[in-house]
Image (tube, helix red, strand yellow):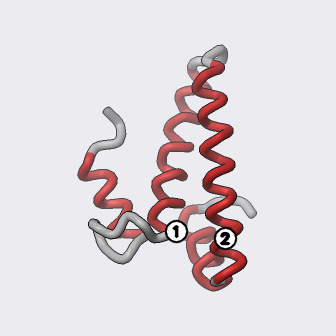
Amino acid sequence: MYLTKEVKEGLFEKHGKGKADTGTSEGQIALFTFRINHLTEHLKKNRKDFNTERSLVKMVGKRRSLLDYLKKTEINRYRAIIIELGIRK
């Protein structure tokens, strides 16, 4: 399994306020980015996996809405997470 409890805690500890704080926008964006990267690699090997492709598109949309929310409320946190995760604008 690619997403273990330790990996999740590490993501939330690095990008959120702590490993138990899973509600921050930065932590959720980091988790979505990790999952999106994993699914992208999967789809490079399995081009005809349309169910995974659909879930990837939905996940990108959820991440985009979180980024839009963060951009609207606190622009400095938005800019920091964009640079930290290497996400295109």
For label 2, the residue is: 69
Image quarter of residue 68: bottom right
From this view, report whether residue 46 is shown above or below residue 8.
above
Q: Which of 56 and 79 is in front in this view?
A: 56
Residue 48: percent from left, percent from top:
65, 14
In the structure shown, which secondary structural element does the residue marked by tag 1 occupy? helix
User: Looking at the image, which residue is at 62% across and 68% down?
Assistant: 82
Q: How crowded is mark 2: few (under 14 residues within 10 Å), some or many (20 or more)?
A: some
In the structure shown, which secondary structural element does the residue marked by tag 2 occupy? helix
Residue 7: percent from left, percent from top:
31, 51
Q: Are marks 2 and 1 in contact (CB under 8 Å)?
A: yes
For label 1, the residue is: 25
Residue 37 vs residue 47: left or right?
A: left
The amino acid sitting under disc 2 is: Tyr
Residue 85: percent from left, percent from top:
55, 63
Q: Residues within 10 Å of mark 1 (few under 14, many from 20)?
A: some
